[in-house]
Image (spheres, coloured by chain):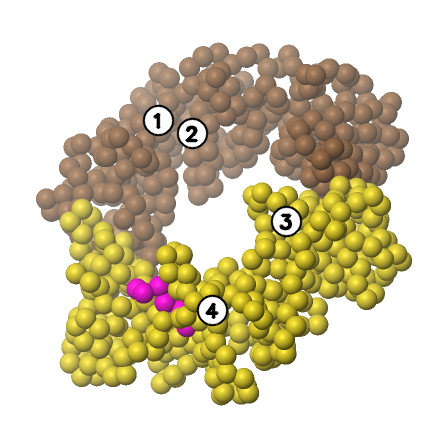
Chain colours: A brown, B yellow
């Protein structure tokens, strides 16, 4: 192999693929990136066996070839030079990188030992706008279960209806649902593992336009012209979470999001266990209080607008902070749905595309 | 106690003292800050028994008093509010903090249980410019020994001569000396512990003008009108390090600092043990090479100006990076002093105030 690449493009490509390179693996080949000439371009591939990524960049190809090289050293090296053109030459699995100021040789491995990243051959499910995808994934990621005790909760539930895509997650303490309008012929639903979501959201920030979604046997891929990510899906059926979302409220309050967030955070300093921040909503004021027999107590107040009866509720303050973080309006609505029912958090402007629930505490 | 303070001043004072608050201590009182009215102002004090800090701010005092309060909660709370005026009231060792939007009560402790930070009664040794002090301390901090195997090396040696102050440190692998001109009647030398130096340098960034140095029995203090820091000194005699600094060189090379730093860093990626970065200085070019039987090899070159014979030397690349970091000139001088003798690093412009030595590797 002998090729010439632009340093900026090469660095970007390394940045995209290196994050899925396996760390501390018992299979040393997985800590490598595969470089392979393909149709006049250079393909970089990495996989941790759960997620595989291919990224393709333009290159001047003088001689085709392939090699697997340790991700860490090539990425550190390339990230720290500023020579514009880089010549990559492979001989006996040694990658020589030469540029105006540097000559290096990096010991690599036979590309044949690198695992094959599967291709999904089915017809594409949909082409969805990458910005909306990223925004939706990031809205629901926080309430994905971290434990694998119930594997289906350790991922994001995605459902393509005929006229919308719905994203949902719950760790059984809180639940988030986010959706956007999207016309699509096929109806499908599946569960994407948490790590895949995080990687996809990260990479989506670097992409424009649409990504094509392909579903295979327990696998999914997201791709565009330069990029492809393949991941396993979570096995199992997602619980019927819709029935947990209350369809009516007892009282609701409209309140400034930043003020509420700040006051909850301050009250959190005085909380000792997860339930001792109390929110009391009266006619034109919401009070946040917390009391801790070791530390002391706090009382703060925010102007707010109440509909129906005053109410009070005790919460794990981390959960409400997580919910406020994903609201994108200046004011938010808290819906009280009764003792022993969830507290519902929504954007202020009657939007139905985002809802966040905090389940009642079991005493 | 009942006083009113300005939030910004109070926050700054907390920031200065809280860093020496003891963490994970077996003496719970040490995780507190002592608040005490004093001559119409408010004094904040903290100590970890090695270092003690007092910081005094203006306050409107309605009633004198004192209390010790857990540092963490009061600092987190004060740092996150923006009400301008804060009223502090103490009753039965409970500190009430009230402001426009917040009411809190923080459970404190009896101020009498807080350890006394010693006063050094001796005549001041000197009043030295705080900027020069900070700059000197930061220049030599990197080569202080981290191990306490030889306690005297775990601090910075400071020596007041009649016309200069000298700062030195060595961990026996490298050595730094920094000095500045300073007329002072008293001749004195002492060793400041590493932690004290770090705290002092941090706080020095917030101060202006001069700080007064007082020496006591194995203690030292640094103070100005608002601030006082008292620390133990390191016991023992500092080695006669001056005799290690070569007074002549075999060859020397003038080279761009940033280029050298970047190339050494890149070569470091290919080093496996601490000695395999090699610097070869020829007439008009310095080559940096590294070779590692597991990773590969690198060769880079920088334009440079040699005096006398070409030379080559193998180095722990971390040590030369540490030395380059403290050089404040665009070009630096490397002095080769012979096989088995230190490599000397200096600023380019014949300045004698800063010198950094890397000891030869023992093979």
Q: Check disc 3 and report the residue beneath it.
A: B30
Between marks 4 and 2, how big is the CA–CA gap?
54 Å
Q: Quadrant of residue A126?
A: top left
| Residue A94 shown in magenta | no
User: Does residue A259 show up?
Assistant: no
Q: Is residue A341 above or below residue B335?
A: above
* Label annotation for residue A196: 2
Helix, strand or loop status at disc 2? helix
Helix, strand or loop status at disc 1? loop
Between marks 3 and 2, how big is the CA–CA gap?
46 Å
The boundaries of the magenta stretch are B168-173
Q: Nearer the viewer, mark 4 or mark 2?
A: 4
Q: Check disc 1 and report the residue beneath it.
A: A50
Q: Nearer the viewer, mark 1 or mark 4?
A: 4
Q: Residue at x 67, y 54 (%)?
A: B115
| Badge 1: chain ID | A
Label 1 crowd bin: few (<14), some (14–19), many (20+), radius 10 Å: some
| Mark earlier in primary sequence (4, 3) | 3
């Amino acid at each position: 192999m002998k090729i010439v690449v632009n340093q900026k493009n090469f660095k970007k490509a390394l940045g995209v693929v290196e994050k899925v390179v396996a760390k501390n693996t018992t299979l040393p080949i997985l800590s490598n990136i595969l470089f392979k000439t393909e149709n006049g371009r250079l393909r970089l591939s990495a996989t941790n066996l759960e997620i595989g990524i291919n990224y393709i960049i333009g290159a001047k190809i003088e001689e085709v070839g392939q090699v697997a090289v340790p991700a860490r050293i090539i990425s550190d090296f390339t990230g720290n030079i500023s020579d514009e053109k880089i010549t990559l030459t492979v001989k006996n699995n040694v990658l020589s990188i030469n540029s105006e100021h540097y000559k290096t040789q990096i010991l690599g491995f036979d590309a044949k030992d690198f695992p094959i990243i599967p291709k999904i051959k089915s017809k594409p499910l949909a082409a969805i706008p990458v910005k909306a995808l990223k925004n939706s994934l990031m809205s629901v990621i926080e309430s994905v279960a971290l434990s694998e005790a119930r594997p289906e909760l350790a991922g994001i539930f995605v459902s393509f209806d005929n006229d919308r895509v719905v994203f949902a997650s719950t760790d059984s303490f809180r639940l988030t649902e986010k959706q956007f309008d999207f016309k699509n012929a096929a109806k499908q639903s599946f569960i994407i593992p948490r790590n895949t979501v995080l990687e996809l959201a990260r990479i989506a920030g670097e992409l424009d336009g649409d990504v094509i979604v392909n579903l295979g046997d327990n696998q999914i891929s997201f791709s565009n012209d330069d990029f492809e990510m393949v991941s396993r899906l979570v096995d199992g059926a997602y619980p019927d979470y819709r029935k947990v979302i209350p369809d009516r409220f007892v009282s609701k309050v409209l309140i400034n999001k930043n003020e509420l967030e700040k006051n909850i955070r301050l009250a959190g300093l005085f909380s000792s266990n997860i339930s001792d921040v109390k929110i009391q909503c009266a006619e034109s004021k919401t009070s946040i209080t917390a009391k801790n027999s070791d530390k002391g107590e706090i009382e703060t107040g925010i102007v707010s607008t109440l509909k129906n009866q005053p109410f009070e509720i005790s919460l794990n303050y981390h959960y409400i902070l997580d919910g406020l973080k994903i609201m994108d309006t200046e004011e938010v609505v808290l819906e009280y749905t009764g003792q022993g029912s969830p507290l519902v958090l929504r954007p202020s402007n009657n939007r139905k595309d985002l809802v966040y629930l905090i389940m009642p505490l079991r005493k």
